[in-house]
Amino acid sequence: MNEPLVLGIETSCDETGIGIVRGRTLLSNTIASSMDEHARFGGVVPEVAARAHLEALQPSIDAALAEAGVRLDDLDAVAVTSGPGLAGALMVGVGAAKGLAVSLGKPLYAVNHLVGHIAADILTPDAEPLEYPTIALLVSGGHTSLLHVRDLTTDVELLGETVDDAAGEAFDKVARLLSLPYPGGPEIDRAALDGDPNAIRFPRGLSRASDLAKHRYDFSFSGLKTAVARWVERYEADPATGATAIPVADIAASFREAVVDVLVTKALAACADLGVPRLLLGGGVIANKRLREVALERAEAAGVTVRIPPLSLCTDNGAMIAALAAELISSGRRPSTLAFGADSTLPVTEIQVAEAVPA
Amino acid sequence: MILAVDTSLGTAVALIDADGTRRAEATTTDPLGHAEVIGVLLAEVLSEAGPGDITHVVAGMGPGPFTGLRIGIAAARTFALGRGIPVVSVPSHLAAALTTLETVTGPFAIVTDARRREVAITVFEGTDADGIPHVVSDTVLVKAVDADAHLDGIRRVDVASFSAADLARVGASALAADRTLTGDEPLYMRHPDVTMPGAPKKVGS
Ligand SMILES: [Zn+2]
């Protein structure tokens, strides 16, 4: 089976993603998002997300099949995200994938969401094949992870991750602090347009020499969020400035610069330390233009090649899950048994979950 | 054949013939682990039932603690999608009522755990003209300690697992009578934000 036709189901956060691929070719990337329903809460509410997944699943599968121009009977396999992610949300996808696979009598591949983000790259039209090893920086509202990818299907190592908030969460929280709507990423970007990124020197989490010893590749954004809150409090309490509105543009630009700086610095440090001149970016926060700019600029100076999949494949989606399963199939891996569950903290080293043992 | 799936309490899967005869059934009473077992139970029931076309999938719509409830509904819907057959949505208490009616006459209340120290209660008496248990009063959530006072002497039937075969039979009766027993929305009984640990965390806290 050289070019397996795979349908992937992704429900780890607030996007219901159904993707269909034939080998490395993208046939459909259907995404239904419950983002609007979370807006009034200022962040993803797991139960709201899980309810929305159940509603969106069937119409999304129908839409994906129609777009890809294939029938369920044509599929070679079904793939699903087993973790990491929100437990209740993941379970909807797992239940759906099992129902579909058993109904069709097709093999089922349960895979790792984070490794899926890397697999998104291979769906990039006309791209050169992914070269190994590569460092991967995955940044979204749910995760901030730095990975060493020696092989997509067999060897992915976690170098570091956030010890508190994900970068995307920090954007949401700071946006709320600045009275900007949810989701915060695009709003901070807009507000930062006229701002000076060097106006305020916000802290770079886990970047001091003492932190670097233990957390060289880890991230922390909770202190940064607190620093922004304190700065705003002090500004408002100061008789000299309190009467004027807070400088939202400068705060937004300086906050964003602090996030981008620490992300890019640590990613390129990993490239340098490990002698890997390749950096792959993934996750929804890659949509942030400033992050892409700074990453490309500094990577070039460091002699590191940067790969960025199309943005529609950077946000959570089912196509990347299908793509990873297609790679597993092509490399001869057996399907998963039916007895796996949702694992909200699935380690990145578990690329496939519950692979069947040979009889 | 009619396939029924329910994960509102434990995980229950069954296949019956169109006339109601049980072909295969597989159940776990574990109130967790639905995602882990659903595929295995489906496969078991299919292989035990042997050959034959499945014409409908009955989904138990709860009430039930939300996380587990959805897994069976999701699996029922995608199974139906895979076979190109329709889904029949049935409130799960109707299955328990049909089971209870084998031994009980007069009014009775199906009582199930709804977590958070609450129970879900539906009062039934007999069956209607279509053979479907007759609902005397709709499902409500009541504090567990207040349940007996709420029932005021109505016979109480505490249920820890549903019979998927009886769920399938209720579905078959609904199909025969061309009736819709409940909508597409699971019987969550609570708003989604009640699961939040307080309000979303405040910035700076
Ligand atoms: Zn993601």
Image: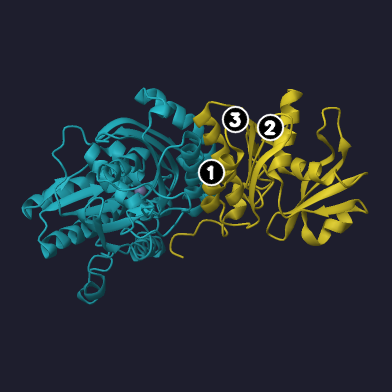
Chain colours: A cyan, B yellow
Distance from Cα at disc 2 to Cα at disc 3: 9 Å
According to the picture, the residue beneath numbered tag 1 turns out to be B43
CB atoms of marks 1 and 3 within 8 Å: no
CB atoms of marks 2 and 3 within 8 Å: no
Q: Position of residue B161 (x, y in %)?
A: 71, 52
Pointer 2 local density, CA inside 10 Å: few below 14, some 14–19, many at least 20: many
According to the picture, the residue beneath numbered tag 2 turns out to be B17
Q: Specify the quadrant that holds the N terminus of chain B.
A: top right
Answer with the quarter of the image where residue B2 lies: top right
**Residue type indicated by callout 3:** Ile
Distance from Cα at disc 1 to Cα at disc 3: 14 Å
Answer with the quarter of the image where residue A216 lies: bottom left
* Mark 3 secondary-structure assignment: loop
The answer to whether residue B203 is left or right of residue A277 is right
Pointer 1 local density, CA inside 10 Å: few below 14, some 14–19, many at least 20: some
According to the picture, the residue beneath numbered tag 3 turns out to be B54
Q: Position of residue B179 (x, y in %)?
A: 74, 25
